[in-house]
């Protein structure tokens, strides 16, 4: 049995909530090839950036970043993306948000989830996504209808001051909306130039397969990837179900919550501190989870993984992210950071990835004790 | 034999008539979440609304309203809609029209037929429809052609000052226009973003089935619902033919004239008053109908239904509307009211719906004596 | 053997020629229902129109006009259209052109070929066409390519100051252009809203059938009608080949040159007058034709038809046009007139149509001696 | 074994390089029919053109030019096109570029590759192409994705200040991008009106066939032509593989480098001069190639072809270009010239084409000793 600790804020919340979270931040790209007249970076921001000068020199543009095709599409994304929506809920300042995005961009990150950046660099050098939500009270009244998808995306584009996003995600599936309507609406926004690709978020494998099948039946555009939670304690979907979809229909995985909301960094090993997310209003559930039997077992495993990280001379966070990156079919892992220090630490996971040899992975699987098994395949082998 | 008492004004009239009836009224949504800079509500209107303050408090937003998917589409509509076209023919003032729409919106109504409202709330929170007419003298010259459908919708949008409607209806079918041309034109306006969905109005089951079949053949967009007359004395289409279409191809029913132009409220029980619709010029037909043998029988049944309503502690109108709502495949019943008192009374039918138990429905069927029977099915059973 | 006397000027000419012939003329619609602020009719024009006041009173709007569906499409066109391109080559003044169009419009004509009118009435009340030419020197260099079709139509719309035409015709077929490219380009301009329908002009039956077949294969839009020459001495295509297409694929016939450039009016019965078209530069061919053996036989038949017209108390032109209208599958006959007197005379042919009984048609066929026979059908019967 | 001497600059370079090479030059069309108010030709340019007056008189518009359909499409292109991208790398002045384009246009050239011209003549009288690059460092990060194709073309159009190009080419194929995505993106830009046709550049026959097959499967738009290198020492693709594609799916060949970067003109017969391209930085490869055994053999053959040209009273360049034009399926040969003298010399090859009799072609094949053979066909015959 897996315990899912999702920190995708707003998953159960209303539409008004997440709409507030889309934020447009000017990104200061230090290595942009030519100076453009439209640069909007103000002196104060530039000041902030000077402080990061040493980092950028150390990193250089694209120094270590790896790029992967998003599923079997032609779109190449950095294997680490910035989950800006989760990141910049309402906790950090615009100045910090800009610094984080600038460092991310200069480190070769080209995938920015659910938020837009103003870059002095070219629009074509990064990938922006947005999401059409469904699930809250307001959404239940509206349904995941053609009307809601189109108007939802128009609303996002208007708030982001963009003509188009690169990927639009349909969050959760609405059992009352016919799949044909959803796929037709997604094809419509792509045909209109409002989006380049579409993906799913929190859909199960059968729903994604149905979307693909409907797209084939009516010559519409199939989805290119699924956004899914993925970390040590939430493995089945990404390791068991999505690889099959990747091989059969080319749908890739863009995963989020690699650190299980900070749980895996050892943040809560000694209890919940006052300033942490678990202590915040609305996270009572997380706090209670941590004190359950299941939660205590997980904390114990986290401590062992901490020792393993020490052995590899990396941090617990870097090990956890590299472990996600090793998985077949994972196109990109979305990071959720709140400052540049965290970001730079997380980016270091790319270096750790090469250390994850098959014996080490086996050791980690033994330690976690939750490697998913495909019953059918096992049956065939015996 | 059913007697149809349709009050869909302009059904036999010319184009110029119904074009006059589209009206744009500012809707004052008292519970809009945030204050917007574009609010156009003038002081006089606000004054009008203060008068309704007690109503809104009593109702609250969405208090009792139920939402249903429109057919098997993903679009969710309130089970009671505002048939503004019928409502606001030319009989009530702009101020009253605005009050009616405001109360409707605040009561959770999100479906406004053939008229547009200006709301300080979000455009995405209500559904607007319009109709392409065919049948009058001018239409006969034009045909239900691609040209007429596209230009007709452009004309509507221009008069309504809208970029798009949610549903565009093709009124009546033109036997001279090929179905492929109609469905291609409807798909064109949807592909152009001028409408979200399309529906039919006063089409028979075979025509709707043909439209669906042509859409499937050429990968075009099928219709989502049929607008049909439905009340105690006009049952066959909605109870016999449309459920089959609903199950097979997902087309829902949006019904109008639940009170048979006021006939069912007992308005004409004691003869036709001078100020009533039946007394107006052009309603000679209705007046004659009421004095026919068939008409007299219906008036007698209406009196019995009145007694039944008294028993249920509701009005005759509430009973009649609730009776429509009970029918499978009915997505929404369009109300035709001329003031806020009537509207509030009609909205009360949602409460009555829960009282319509199977025995009560059986009692009403016995009283009406016109329950439609599917000959084929009966034959199969015997 | 048929003798074809086509007067479709520019058929063998260059592109620059026919582009000059598109002309935008303000049409004064006396019976327009409501006064609009955009009326551009100047006083001088109004003066011209006052002179026609008696005509309009006599005619009334739509008095005698008959409407037919264009092929099996849903578009209804008046059975007599105004072939303005031929009409207003360069021979009549703008004032006369306007008067002709105004009288035509007021007489119920709603089809204007290859030219646009500015009407104070609604745009949706008439049908405008344009043509993409191919065949001249410049066209041979360009081919009937996607590029030429799209740019050609854009050019027409720009010159006509229109957003769209109702029907765009592809003039002649280019054996080097693949049919798929032509049909895709026509579908593109329709999908873009630059045209409502497309038709062919001077294509043979096999070419039209191929266009239809390609449209069906790739789910593109098939053509709705063929423009063809049709008069006493040019019958095979319209009477033999097009009816089969009409029945099988719904393509209708819009015919031109009903008077064979004036030949049938008896204009040249006594030789070629100096001011006539046949005497003009470039019409040497027509002059020589008239003096050939074949031409002399035709002139003799024309004299007999004149006597027949006298018997029916109509003019030779009215008889010739009514004879065209009697033919199955002819949706509209394009008139080529140069003044309002001619137009009013030609419009009178609708009245004559009812006099064309089967015995009279048989008499005319005997007189003409050129009734087309379908060899295959005859063979089947024997 | 063929030796390929490609001079397609930037093939292995980055995106920033080739973007610099798109240049917008005002073209002075001396024979434009009417004077337009938008003419931007400045006095200095006009001066330049006066110098060419004698040439233009000698040539006249369209004097000798031949036109061919591009593959089996309906687009007619001059058999000689101007490969302006190669031509105007960064070596010649804007004034010379303008002169070259003006002379080309006045000589009947209507195909301008990868660069736009401002012409006082009509936009519809010439064909403009552009290319979406893939292969350099920046492209590898991006992939030949939908995003890159659409944004790349938008970027080109913006730099060229054009609404659309006639043909957009996908340069090289990206094995990681699914063919469906490429063909859907190309169809998107055509449906949006940003391009009229699309073609491939440097794709192999199987890749082109796959693109065609995917287009047929999903009813998308297939490519119309392949841009390929073609000259005496690079024959297999154009003579062996493309004719089969031409016959089966109508894809034509637009060839470049007819003179193998000047090699065939005898420029390097006596070694590499300092001012030549081979001496330039970055052409070390070419210099080394020329001194290899294979290179020496080729130089010897070039000398013999020089003697053959003398016999035909034409230049070596004219013979080489005419030899390309003789090949079946070659729609147009792109010239790479750096001044008007070279251009006029090259244009003379059309005259030479008529002298290339079968015996002469056989003589040249014997001399070159590299006539491609289709193994399969040979096998079938024996």
Image: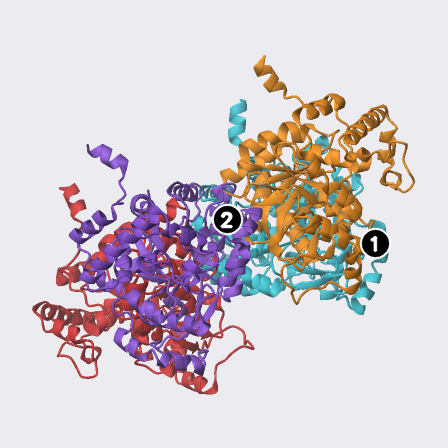
Chain colours: A cyan, B red, C purple, D orange
Residue at 50 percent across and 58 percent down: it is C18
Find disc 2 in the rendering and name its residue: C135
Find disc 1 in the rendering and name its residue: A55
For the residues marked 2 and 1, what is the alpha-carbon distance in whole angstroms? 68 Å
Residue at 15 percent across and 46 percent down: it is B378
Residue A36 placed where, x, y %?
77, 62
Residue extending farthest top: D382
Both on one chain, marks 2 and 1?
no
Q: Quadrant of residue B171?
A: bottom left
- Please name whichever residue, D165 or D100, is drawn nearer the observer in this view of the structure: D100
Q: Quadrant of residue A340?
A: bottom right
- Please name whichever residue, B49 or A355, is drawn nearer the observer in this view of the structure: B49
- Please name whichever residue, A32 or A298, is drawn nearer the observer in this view of the structure: A32
Q: Secondary structure at mark 2?
A: loop
Nearer the observer: mark 2 or 1; the answer is 2
- Please name whichever residue, B365 or C83, is drawn nearer the observer in this view of the structure: C83
The disc label shown at residue A250, or none: none
Mark 1 nearby-residue class (10 Å; few <14, some 14–19, many ≥20): some
């Amino acid at each position: 049995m897996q315990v899912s600790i999702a920190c995708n804020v707003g998953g159960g919340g209303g539409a008004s909530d997440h709409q507030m979270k889309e934020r447009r931040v000017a990104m200061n790209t230090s290595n942009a090839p030519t100076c453009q007249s439209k640069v909007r970076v103000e002196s104060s921001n530039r000041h902030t950036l000077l402080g990061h000068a040493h980092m950028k020199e150390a990193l250089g543009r694209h120094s270590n970043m790896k790029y992967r095709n998003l599923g079997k599409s032609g779109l190449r994304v950095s294997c680490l993306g910035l989950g800006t929506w989760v990141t910049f809920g309402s906790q950090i300042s615009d100045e910090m948000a800009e610094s984080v995005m600038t460092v991310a961009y200069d480190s070769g990150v080209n995938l920015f989830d659910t938020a837009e950046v103003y870059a002095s660099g070219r629009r074509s050098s990064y990938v922006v996504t947005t999401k059409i939500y469904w699930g809250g009270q307001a959404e239940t009244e509206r349904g995941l209808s053609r009307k809601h998808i189109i108007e939802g995306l128009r609303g996002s584009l208007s708030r982001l001051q963009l003509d188009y996003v690169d990927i639009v995600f349909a969050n959760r599936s609405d059992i009352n909306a016919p799949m044909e309507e959803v796929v037709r609406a997604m094809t419509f926004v792509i045909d209109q130039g409002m989006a380049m690709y579409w993906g799913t978020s929190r859909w199960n494998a059968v729903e994604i397969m149905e979307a693909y099948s409907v797209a084939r039946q009516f010559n519409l555009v199939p989805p290119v990837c699924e956004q899914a939670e993925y970390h040590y304690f939430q493995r089945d979907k990404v390791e068991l179900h999505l690889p099959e979809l990747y091989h059969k229909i080319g749908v890739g995985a863009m995963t989020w919550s690699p650190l299980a909301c900070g749980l895996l960094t050892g943040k809560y090993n000694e209890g919940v501190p006052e300033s942490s997310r678990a202590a915040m209003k609305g996270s009572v559930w997380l706090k209670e989870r941590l004190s359950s039997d299941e939660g205590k077992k997980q904390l114990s495993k986290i401590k062992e993984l901490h020792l393993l990280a020490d052995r590899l001379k990396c941090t617990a966070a870097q090990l956890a992210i590299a472990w996600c990156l090793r998985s077949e079919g994972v196109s990109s892992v979305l990071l959720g950071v709140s400052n540049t220090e965290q970001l730079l630490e997380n980016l270091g996971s790319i270096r750790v990835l090469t250390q994850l040899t098959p014996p080490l992975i086996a050791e980690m699987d033994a330690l976690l004790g939750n490697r998913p098994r495909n019953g059918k395949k096992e049956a065939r082998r015996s």
